[in-house]
Image (cartoon, coloured by chain):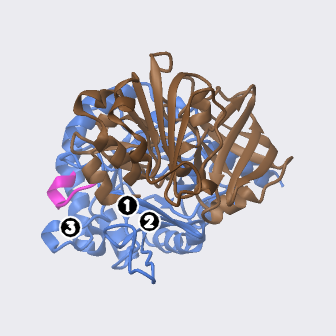
Chain colours: A brown, B blue
Amino acid sequence: MTAPTDSVSRISAMDMILPGVFRVRFRLPDEMPEPVPGQFLQLEATPGLFPVTRRPFTVNRMMDDIIEVIFEEVGWGTSLLASLEPGDPLRILGPLGNGWRGLDRGRWLLVGGGLGAAGFQFLLDRINCAEVVLGASDAGRILPLKTDSPVFLATEDGSTGTTGLVTDLLSPDLLAKPENIAVCGPIPMMNAVWRMIPEASRGRVQVSTESRMGCGWGVCEGCSIPSTDGGYVKCCSEGPVFPGKVIDWDRWMEVGL
Amino acid sequence: MTGPALRPVMWETDFPSPLMLASGTAGFGRELLDLRCLDAVGAVVTKAVTMEPRPGNLPPRILETPMGLLNSIGLANPGAKAVLEEILPGLEGFPCPLLINVAGETVSEFAEVVQVLENSPLQLGYEINVSCPNVSRGGRAFGEEPAVVEDASRAVSRVTERPFSVKLTPNGGDIVEAAKAAESGGASAVTVCNTFLGMFMDWRTGDTILKRGVAGYTSPALLPLVVARVWQVSNAVSIPVISSGGVSGGEDVLQLLAAGARMVQVGTRLMRRPGVAAEIMAEVGRLLQE
């Protein structure tokens, strides 16, 4: 793997695509290695001293040399980012972490919860996808995906797709077929999906995780997630995509985000 | 007035720059080597090493505040033996001096950890973290009691010929007295200082997010507090003072050197900018030319 770089790009587009959800595009800096699906970037929205850490985001999509990131405005850091306009400089550290393994290995089932589906477009563009299953609270939280594969939707308020949870759509038949199952969403959603998968199929599962992150490049051990060896794995440098079996789901559910 | 020493000599060693990367923000140096971000780094201080492996605290471990960062990592590390056998050999040929930060629950643990690490040829010396709780003194930080700081320094100086700095706490006791005690105990320098005790409280729910409640706080806003302590300590001891805390730019480094620091550590800023040392030293060069 080539080393990440820290360089300045310029924003080419900033659009609100859902209420409070933004899509930002910028050019891949010349010196930066091209990300792979599942990797993330540490974005620095301001050259000022505060906030003291960057904000980590997965790459939603690559369009030639244009990087696309989707993020939700949830606090000060993401508000600063959302306030940037085309032409503004944006400092990017990346690509960071490990992406989805075995992109060319058989068929994939993608299971996303809410904005956890950010990043799925990049994955869809590089795999042989069987089905996509997405769940969200309402239609305003379903990210649009470009794919020829069937997409099944569930919303808690029934505003689109089936009324219910993403797990309601996961039939044993659906889970049995694909060689790969990619899961990304809130911790309780990923945990619920994990529990539904028969023991024999769990080796096929990969999950894209998130955590409160300090550095993003493996030094501070701030983003640790409980692992099945009784210790912790670093979300940033050992993940953010992990085989599902690496995560100690009980302990992770207990500590939360 | 002569200019600040930008290639300082300390412990009979020429340092490539006065900037050290603070313990806990640079891992064991491996990642910075991979990122090619060691230009202009005077020395790397590793994360704390204890005798036994420590998994670290329950997550979440990091909480950003509007003007700083609270951390509650819990000295996560693989233990002295694994560091000696598995980590240090991989760092052979490391391009700048390495100090190993050492933590313990008792005075004797500091010396035991150092004894294990003495079997490595790699490190220039050590940094002794006396800000952790002293189990045999009811959890009070070692650094709060000058007599204990002196004991710890003496215990370490008995087991190594290598230089070591004692990293003092700003959270209790008199830091000047603690620095003098470290000097009496044989310390080769003091690091001033460790993180400041801080806490977040969600007034709506009573939730502190970080499970231990109190945590270590770092911020650019702490600079004047560190400058004051560096100035007080450097006027009271004759061993070198290494500053730690509050640094984000060249002005800060020059200010700390002027206040009496021989070397200046940068930490939280490094997490955001892996190439911070080169950035800061370029800025220092520009400032000195003006």
Tag 3–tag 1 contact (CB < 8 Å): no
Q: In this orientation, which residue lies closer to the viewer: A89 or A117?
A: A117
Same subunit, tags 3 and 2: yes
| Residue A221 falls left or right of residue A124 | left
Residue type at tag 1: Lys
List the single residue furthest toward the bottom. B203
Quarter placement of the N terminus of chain B: bottom right
Identity of the residue drawn at 44% across and 44% down: A209
- Numbered circle sitting on residue B167: 1
| Residue B67 falls left or right of residue A183 | right
Identity of the residue drawn at 73% across and 57% down: A82
Q: In this orientation, which residue lies closer to the viewer: A47 or B140?
A: A47
Tag 1–tag 2 contact (CB < 8 Å): yes
Tag 3, which chain? B
Residue type at tag 2: Cys
Q: Is residue B173 magenta?
A: no
Residue count near mark 1 (Cα–Cα under 10 Å), binned few <14, some 14–19, many ≥20? many
Tag 2, which chain? B
Q: Quadrant of residue B183?
A: bottom left
Q: In this orientation, which residue lies closer to the viewer: B170 or A188?
A: A188
Which portion, as a residue range, is magenta?
A: B103-110
Identity of the residue drawn at 49% across and 60% down: B244
Tag 3–tag 2 contact (CB < 8 Å): no
List the residue tagged with mark 2. Answer: B193
Q: Position of residue B45 (x, y in %)?
A: 42, 46
Residue count near mark 3 (Cα–Cα under 10 Å), binned few <14, some 14–19, many ≥20? some
Q: CA distance from mark 1 to mark 2?
A: 6 Å
Identity of the residue drawn at 71% across and 47% down: A23
